[in-house]
Amino acid sequence: MIRPPSHPAFLALLWTFGMLALPSQGLEQIPVKNHEIEDQSQRSSEQLTLGMVSGDSQFFDPIRVGWLNECAERNITCHYLPVNYTYYFENQADDYIHPCVPLMLDLIDMGVDGISAACKFEDVTPWMKAHQAGIPLVAFDSKPPEGFPVPLEAYVGTDQNFLGRTMARLLKQLKPAGGNFGIVGTPAFADRIEGFRDEIFKDNDREDRAHWEEVEMEIESYDLENDIDQFHWFMDLLAEKNPTAMIFMYQTPMRAENYTQFVEKHRHRQIVYIGTDGSQYQLEYLERRYVDGLVGQLPYDMGAFSAEILQKAAMKRKVQTVDSQEVTDHTSEEIILDAPVIAHVPTNLVAYNLIPIELPPLEVDQSLLGPLVIAGYICFVILALASILSIFWTLWNRDGTVVKASQPAFLIMTAFGILLMASALIPLSYDDGGTPETMNESFAVGVCMSIPWLVFTGFTCTFAALFSKTWRVNKFFHSKAAFGRLKVSEYDVIAPFVILISLNFIVLICWTVIDPLTYERNFELGTDYWNREIASVGRCQSEHAIAYLVPLAVLNFFSLVIAAWQAWQARDIESEFSEAKYIGLSIFSMCQAFLTGIPIVAVVKDIPEAFYLVTVFLIFILCLVVLSLIFLPKVQMQQKYSKMSRAEQKKMMTISVRRSSLKSTEMMLKSVEDLKN
């Protein structure tokens, strides 16, 4: 990525975002800032004296302020003792005592009621003496090692692994194209380094994500913990390998006097520098482009939380009944065998970086159907051709024996209903190309409302026609005048069809007028590293769609049920007159399609491409099965009858009528006998 220009107005922009640090693995997280203290504890708080042993760098200044402010707010006497680490490093010897040790021992001798310390844990002596003296202990900034033998009230500080992960995310933000990086750190920051590597490498196995590689350096050959000069040798060697980014896992490299000279020396390499913490001098470096991003801890909270936790722990000990029995000392070995669980009080992180004037290109996933719409159009063409051919076949053979007996008007209505349902695939396949602003309101409503109009009208037309057709046959064969002359015209059974269609129209008109489905493109949740929306989906939306879908579903389910009932009544009528068997197969196939398709639709409803394909194939299968089961047997039978003479056709039809009438009569007589019994 091209380095952003260093314009003064641009340099003034700092983007800051805060993230709550997650609790470290293996540590128990406890809540803080709960001021519900017992009355007796509150009255005794002014008798408390607490002590803090802290560092002497700029990072610890906010800790001191947070500590003293919280103590003042709680009316507690507090001591703050900074450690002179510079003197310690310059005068370190094999027998030299760490400066934390005498400061902690001084606080123990003063008889303080609690100690908070950011000290090394190699020397357990001061921690053990404080514990044996009954003084509550809190560690901050540095996490105690696993199995630390002294019980602590809490560790207050950042989740170091999460801090490393945040640094990796910041690097991805600044360099979305990927690259390579070098780490400047020591084993003391192993958790940060581990978190950084886990986050930066996690997408390397994906082809659609940027990849990162680490520049190999023999870090063991350099004393990066105690020798400041070796920092510069190491960093110079690392910079000469032309890394995309250099990651500082702690402040020390940036505190060096010649740090700015180092950056200027390698400015031409366009290295991105990511640092830790957000001290004032680091923020000034950020403004002057000596560092590109910082992930800082919130040290003020470390000081404030330490005072709060120690006060509660000290008050708890004061109000407890103290036995006169003398406290028995424990050896380190005994305590180590039962290492205590240390609670973790997490503090937040804050990240700083400059917002470039020219941001990386924005790639928005618009969830467009693209070439998938071809599947919808192909399915529509197949169904449309099949429906139109069925209608023409019916008209062409309307005077034939089989078609005439099958009532051509209702066959045409059935095929027309299938054609209407299939036509819903056209608006369903609409794609706005990611430019919904080119669509006017009428079109946005029309493209969406046409789908329920076509589907529900076509469904009702198909099954209401089958119901009316079968009902007409049943009225003839189940009538007492079956062996005489009975005329049942098409108009005698058209009423249910008209009623169902009218009720569907009433609901659909109300829906269209009151709260129509309207096509809208909305952004999904989630943004890129620069808070830009990265995904949008076009949907048909209505505030109260369910209020209209329910009555429509009930009406069409009713038409399906009554069609099934009439088919059951006509189960013994010959197939020249009735499609009872095929209507039953159609309904069975439809139930199968719904039982398997509807759950899949519900699962993939938030995946536009999958939702589209499942819906298209569900409509296609439903329409094709019904059309095939109704018309293919008719075509075969028509071919069979066409090879007969007119006299043979009349004879076959007479036999079918007598056979169907006899079966109907037998069923009626059996029903009467069953009622008598």
Image: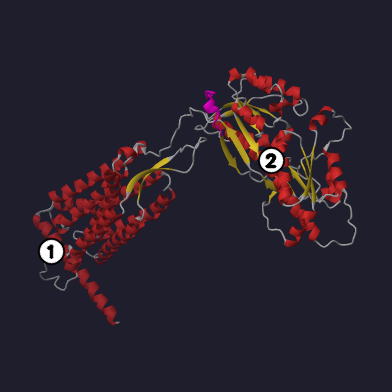
Q: Give the residue number, with chain letter if any, for mark 1.
A: 489
Instruction: State the separation of the CA atoms marked 1 and 2.
Output: 91 Å
The answer, for residue 292, to whether it is visible in the render is yes
Horizontal arrangement in the rendering, residue 277 relative to residue 90 (left or right)? left
Identify the residue at the far right of this view: 326
**Quadrant of the rendered image containing residue 90:** top right
Is 381 within the magenta?
no
Q: Residue at x 71, y 48 (%)?
A: 70
Quick one: SS at disc 2?
Answer: helix
Q: Is residue 451 above or below residue 656?
A: above
Quick one: SS at disc 1?
Answer: loop
User: At which x and y percent is residue 609?
Assistant: 39, 42
Q: Residue at x 27, y 53 (%)?
A: 512
Nearer-N-terminus badge (1/2) = 2
Q: Residues within 10 Å of mark 1 (few under 14, many from 20)?
A: few
Amino acid under disc 2: Pro
Mark number displayed over residue 299: 2
**Quadrant of the rendered image containing residue 187:** top right
Type of colouring:
secondary structure
Magenta stretch prevailing secondary structure: loop
